[in-house]
Amino acid sequence: MELRWKEETEEEEALPKKRDEVERGKAKRAGEGAGAAGIAPLEEGVSHPASRPAEERMPEEGESQGRGDSSNDAVRRQRLNGCSKAAGQEEEEEEEGSAEQGSRPTRAGSAPEEDVRLSASGQEVVMLKRRAAEDLQPSGEPRGSEDALMGELSEMVHKVVKSSSWWERHGVDDTIIALNVLNLPLGFLLLRSSNPFVFLVGIAVLGVAYHTLTVKASHLASHNALTESKSWGKLWSIFFIEVCSAFTAERGSYNHVKMHHAYTNVIGLGDSSTWKIPFLNRYVYMFIAPVAVPVLTPLVAIGLLTEVELKTAIRTLCCMFVGFYAHYWLLINVSGFQSIWSALGCMLITRALLAHAYIHVNIFQHIGLPMFSPDKKPKRIHMMSCGVLNLPRNPLLDWVFGHSLISCHVEHHLFPSFSDNMCLKIKPLVSQYLKKKKLRYNEDSYWSRLKLFLDKYEELMVHAPPISELVGIQ
């Protein structure tokens, strides 16, 4: 104890000298608080790297200890009570305090606030300023919370993917597509029958197979979800989108993947407005217009060819011609149609068989949900949980359109490169996680959505929808 008091006396004698050195250093440290002079005695008991002079260390220590505390008696009491801490400990305490404050909401554009806390001795006041990035967060949303949520969900989902076999990742959906290709000869042969029932079965077989190739297979191919090889994925994309669907692969993939998925329900970008035809009334649009989809699709594709390279446009036209002519040739030479018009009529019927459901599904799952402006769009996990809706499972639609377009559309928008079967596998995990985190998980029935669109057609399909701002969503 005597040695400790002796050291204390020597430090008090050296205090005036230290104070003079600090006063001389004030001219070099513009804006330094008056409390810096009172912190000098504490520096002797603080462990710092030898390479840093006292003048360079004092601004940091002044911030951590608090400005305006120039009481030597208070300093001595702190030293005697063992309240003087290492700088590293002080910095760790401040970082912990900042982390605690990071979970508190701040309003975007507000001035930085200052939180006040007392030290262990109750003598010092520590002023902690929030980081500027925190002030840019929307009200009620902790800094980095959305990114952390998406990262946590992605980690959980990819663990499921790693534990899944190739059959689960790609095999199930590839087999469904292959079975529909094998059903094509059966459908063409059934159309040879003079029995009306058998003939109608042939129409149904061809219609289901056609929509499976042009919707399910084309959709998965646009996301490269049919295979793990990018080269094969490109080949399948051209075959299913251009040959089978009579559309351009480049523009189709760009509009769907780059725009719709990246800017889901963002006004003017990925808001599904391409499905709106305001001059049609509700009944014409919902029940009659879908029949024209097989005719309108190639016309729209030809119009988009002006936006691609010449060689790409030529390839697309050739693929479209091959698809149409192959269908026509098989109807004439295998099914036994006697005239061009009867063959073309059969082509229209089979290609429009499920066009009504195709149009309905595309508008039901996005239109009528929250919409966002381009400059205020939310983070990905909020955008997808609010702007996407799942329909119930349906055996026919699941087979023809795929789970990612029917009952797992939310999962598909969160993880677009997954196959239909993988979206179905992660569905329980994703739904439980979003509900646990108090995020929206939209679900509704096909008939409920149909009734909503018939009742509010003008509001949803004619007039521009109101823009939603995600303020306060947790």
Image (tube, rainbow, N blue to C red):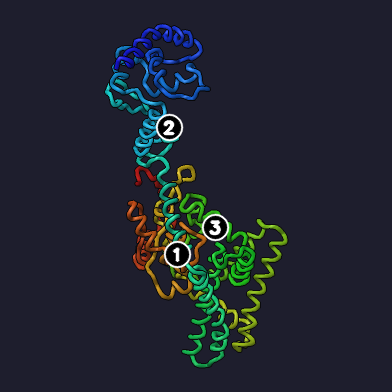
Mark yes or no: residue 407 visible: yes
User: CB of mark 3 within 8 Å of CB of mark 2?
Assistant: no
- Sequence order check, earlier mark of 1 and 3: 3
Residue denoted by label 1: 423
Q: Quadrant of residue 406?
A: bottom left
Tell me the element at label 2. Answer: loop
Mark pair 2, 1: CA separation: 39 Å
Q: Residue at x 42, y 57 (%)?
A: 156
For the residue marked with disc 2, what is the amino acid?
Arg
User: CB of mark 2 within 8 Å of CB of mark 1?
Assistant: no
Mark pair 1, 3: CA separation: 17 Å
Mark pair 3, 2: CA separation: 35 Å
Q: Residue furthest front?
A: 2
Residue denoted by label 2: 131
Measured along the vertical axis of the image, is residue 151 above or below residue 249? Answer: above
Residue denoted by label 3: 257
Q: Quadrant of residue 9?
A: top left
Measured along the vertical axis of the image, is residue 336 above or below residue 361? Answer: below
x, y percent for residue 115: 33, 28
